[in-house]
Image: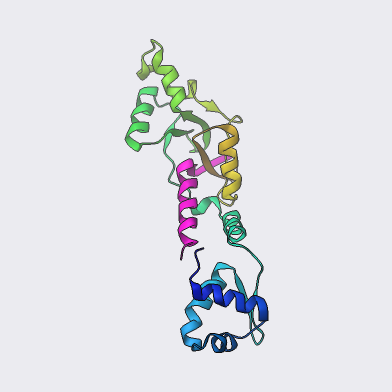
Amino acid sequence: MELSNRQEQIIQIVKDNGPITGENIAERLELTRATLRPDLAILTMAGYLDARPRVGYFFTGKTGSELFTEKLKKFKVWEYQSLPVVVEEDVSAYDAICAMFLEDVGTLFVTNNKSHLVGVLSRKDLLRTSIGSKDLTSVPVHMIMTRMPNITICEPEDLLLDAAQKLIEKQIDGLPVVNPVEDGLEVVGRLTKTNITKALVELARDQHI
């Protein structure tokens, strides 16, 4: 977070004199309490300061990078997941290619007649199939997809950092976000590198309030 000169002064005053009331901070800066209220609110929400009723403000001792990391570690998958793009297991490879291009995604999730996850279909799977001499309209996706249990998944309440680590370790474009149900996994979203990037950009912007 990029601090203003006054906010830097406030932090220094609290470091040297905390706990200290908002009124006392205002007196030292020769300003009114109302004038300082927005700065104190920003510094408290950002985590630089903490406040206790009838005690005052005190410095948390955390740096900007530490606060950035703390916030990132709290993000959950459900906050940034996208809508899943799903095809049924009997759909042809040709139709899957059409769906992939129309939806502009790199991964399709394959479900059975109960709408439960049974496979994942990547660009590589479809490219490998299309290079051959087979008629793509006659090849069902269940013949070329990656099957369970060889699918890396995540759940909505998983930490975003943990899901990002899976993407890196497995070198894949996206993860199906699933909810366990009685006899399978229900697909409720997808998490991609783009989602991770979006989270980082939003967090970086928040740091420059």
| Percent of width and height locating residue 81 | 48, 48
The answer to which quarter of the image holds residue 28 is bottom right
As drawn, is 102 to the left or to the right of 156? left
| Percent of width and height locating residue 12 | 61, 75
Residue at x 61% of width, y 73% of height = 49
Q: Is residue 86 above or below residue 202?
A: above
Q: Nearer the viewer, residue 77 or 116?
A: 77
Residue 189 colored magenta? yes
Q: How many marks?
A: 0
| Percent of width and height locating residue 98 | 33, 29
Residue bounds of the magenta highlight = 183-209
User: Please, which colouring scheme is shown?
Assistant: rainbow
Q: Is residue 87 above or below residue 84?
A: above
Q: Nearer the viewer, residue 199 or 156?
A: 199
Residue 165 colored magenta? no
Residue at x 50% of width, y 25% of height = 145
Q: Nearer the viewer, residue 15 or 93?
A: 15
Q: Nearer the viewer, residue 92 or 15?
A: 15
As drawn, is 32 to the left or to the right of 170? left
Residue farthest to the top?
Answer: 133
| Percent of width and height locating residue 104 | 36, 36
Q: Is residue 79 above or below residue 97?
A: below
The reply to whether residue 18 is visible in this rendering is no
Residue at x 55% of width, y 89% of height = 27
Q: Is residue 10 above or below residue 202?
A: below
The reply to whether residue 122 is visible in this rendering is yes
As drawn, is 102 to the left or to the right of 28? left
